[in-house]
Amino acid sequence: MFGHFYHEIFRKTIIAFGNIFNNIEIHHTNNSDDTISIIKVPLAYGPIQKFLARIEQDPTALKPIKMSLPRMSFEFVGLNYDSSRKVSTTQSFITNTGKKVYMPVPYNMQFEVNIITKLNDDALQIVEQILPYFQPSYNLTVKLVQPINEKRDIPIILDSVSFTDDYEGDYTKRRSLVYTLRFTAKTYLFGPIPSSSTGVIKRVTLDYMSGVEIKKREIRYTVTPRATKDYNNDSTTILSADIDQITTYITVDDATSITTGSRIYLDSELMYIKSKDGNDLVVIRGYEDSKIEGHIAGTSINLVTAADDALIEPGDDFGFNEDTTFFQDFKEYSPSQNTDL
């Protein structure tokens, strides 16, 4: 059931979230309001407990260097399914790379951002540079799945702000002001991505059943794609004489392979063969909404057949072959086995 795939969605979301807070500065001024120092606040990933322990590190330890303040840290702390954004588990979409992908699953990632300072003014400067962007959300655009170039706007919602001032203790204890901001990132998780494009649906089969408890099959309706242009350039024959945009009677060099009810393709015009007499053909011009054009003698004529139907590509315009069959049995069609059971 489960095969290996890894889109690095959590990792990409964590990195994108951390980048929001990567360029925060603190400016210190003198009594004349002149800036005397600018400090870019360092940002690291990790729990607040680790940084508080570093701040209170024993100066007699082997590495007596204490952590400098101000400082910021962030951490991914929780994950839960978001049922409010749920869609059908069988719903899918075609990506811009032509691949069929099932709809992603919505999950909420919880983050904590901790601001640690010695001075209250430093903490307030940092907080004031963050809060105005969250009203209460800030959108990040993240490329979640590289193979299909899938970009999503991830709302980052500010849930709460709390504050602690650790000032108790003797004169050897360092004071630390800690602001804790909690966020929710509404991201999406994708399942495995097919290695090839889905192409065109080749057949749709619908059975109409009668009865409630004992179902009896009555009618089968089948639809397959029909090409509206030539794909394999088979050069069936050539046009014997010029024709204008009105002519419906044409002559070809060799009509052996052309039958009544078939379709031929000249330049970019599709024609339907109404009747045939030797090499003379009566046609319907501009068939399947193709553009009616004039054609000169010697123009290559290509027969449009089931071989062309098989070569239809995603994004092409095409028509449909429709077939209705009547039954009086209790069988059902199995798509996986391509037979009636």
Image (spheres, grey):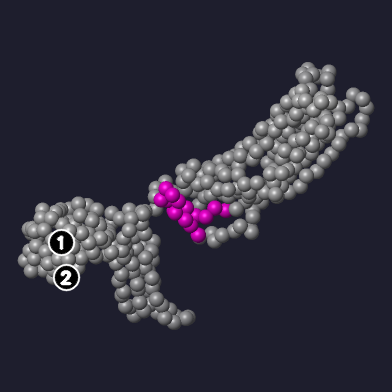
Can residue 210 be seen by looking at this rendering? yes
Q: Quick one: 337 or 50, which is closer to the camera?
A: 50
Q: Residue at x 27, y 60 (%)?
A: 227
Q: Give the range drawn in magenta.
A: 91-105
Residue 152, given in percent of the width and then of the height, sits at 55, 48
- Look at the numbered disc 2 and give the secondary structure of its residue: strand
Instruction: Choose mark 1 or mark 2, whichever is in front.
Output: 1
Q: In this view, does 179 lie above or below 313?
A: above
Q: What residue type is labelled 2?
A: Lys
Q: Is residue 153 left or right of residue 280?
A: right
Alpha-carbon span between mark 1 and mark 2? 18 Å
Residue 137, given in percent of the width and then of the height, sits at 67, 49
Q: Which mark is on residue 244?
A: 1
Q: Residue at x 38, y 73 (%)?
A: 207
Q: Is residue 115 left or right of residue 291?
A: right
- On the image, numbered disc 2 is attached to which residue? 274
Q: Quick one: 269 or 316, which is closer to the camera?
A: 269
